[in-house]
Amino acid sequence: MKENKIKKAPGIGKIITYILLAVWAIIVLFPFYWMILTSVKSYASYNAEYFPKFFTLSPTFENYKEAFTAVPLGQYFLNTVIFTVATTAIMLIVIIPAAFAFSRLEFKGKNLVFTLFLALMMIPNELVVITNFTTITNLDLRNSFIGLILPSVTSVFYIYLLKENFSQIPDELYYAAKVDGTSDFKYLMRVMIPICRPTLVTVTILKVIECWNSYVWPRLITDDPAYFLVSNGIQEIRENGFGRENIPAMMAAVVVISLPLIVLFLIFRNKIMAGVARGGTKG
């Protein structure tokens, strides 16, 4: 009898775990369901609901058409793609050599410099935004892609994550490469980057998500619609009035904007988790 109870216990534990995970999944996914559901409800049916309905018998895609005609959402979408791709590419060019220098090169005061570098993470983002705004304004770079991109081309956290990942590569590989006459640049490109590819993929995807969701900085630095991002577009919809009156059309715009990030995360979710775990594990 005791043996049977011991065997049943793990099974009951798994059932409880799955139930809790299912409940948590429903809680997490419900906002996405509600967003999509609202986007396919007609304006009349949505406003006729005295109590929210969790389904609709007459879905419509008219809201998606209205979202693109109310504001130039397509242009904002293209601007966001340009901003995201350019910022991410430049950031990789900056952080990879920086992480390599801190992890592999030896120079006087390296530990002190890296400690001071990490201390930058303690500065509130609000102070950085004010400083960046003043700098970009003084350089007359407002309402330009350069002004949008420059403040986001580096990240202390990503340098730290990549540096820890680089540090896990055995020193023997580096010394052997130097004996063969390999330069530091070739060693970085042919050895370190291929080995640390999962972390680089993770950093790239996280930066793409960060740029795509950028809201405060684009709102501060641009007032010309030619440089608006999708975040500006959503706010413009609300300020124009139809966002408050026609919630289904606004939700349709949010679905269109969110879909690329959702697809990107679903495709690379395993690499993101593996890269973060690899970067945070030493030894």
Image (cartoon, rainbow, N blue to C red):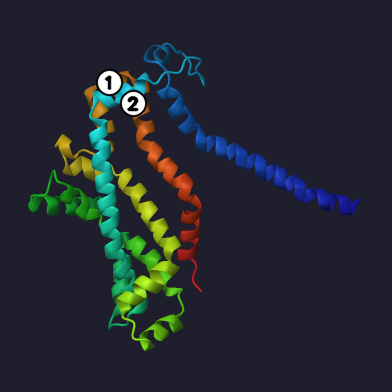
| Amino acid under disc 1 | Phe
Q: Mark 2 points at which residue?
A: 250
- Residue 134 on image: x %, y %: 13, 51
Q: Residues within 10 Å of mark 1 (few under 14, many from 20)?
A: some
From this viewpoint, which residue is outermost toward the right? 1
Task: Give the residue at x 32% y 78%.
Answer: 184
The residue depicted at 27 percent of the width and 42 percent of the height is 80
Q: In this view, does 197 lie above or below 17?
A: below
Residue at horizontal 39 percent and vertical 61 percent from the top: 200
Which residue position is annotated with label 1?
242
Of the residues under marks 2 and 1, which one precedes in the sequence?
1
Above or below: residue 127 compared with residue 172: above
Q: Indicate left or right for 70 with 226 as reference.
A: right
Return the residue nearer the eye: 6 or 282. Answer: 282
Residue shown at 40% from the left, 16% from the top: 42
Residue in front for this viewpoint, 37 or 121: 37
* Cβ–Cβ under 8 Å for marks 2 and 1: yes
**Does residue 208 appear to the left or right of 135 in the view shown?**
right
Check the image and name the residue furthest to the bottom: 179
Q: Is residue 263 above or below residue 183?
A: above
The location of residue 58, given as percent across then percent down, is: 47, 14
Give the camera-side residue of 167 and 58.
Answer: 58
Is disc 2 placed on a helix, strand or loop?
Answer: helix
Can residue 142 be seen by looking at this rendering? yes
Q: What element carries label 1?
A: helix
Q: Where is residue 185 in the image (x, y as percent from the top left)?
A: 30, 75
In the image, what residue type sits under mark 2?
Met
Res. 73 image quadrant: top left
Q: Position of residue 70 (x, y in %)?
A: 25, 23
| Residue 171, above or below 206 | below
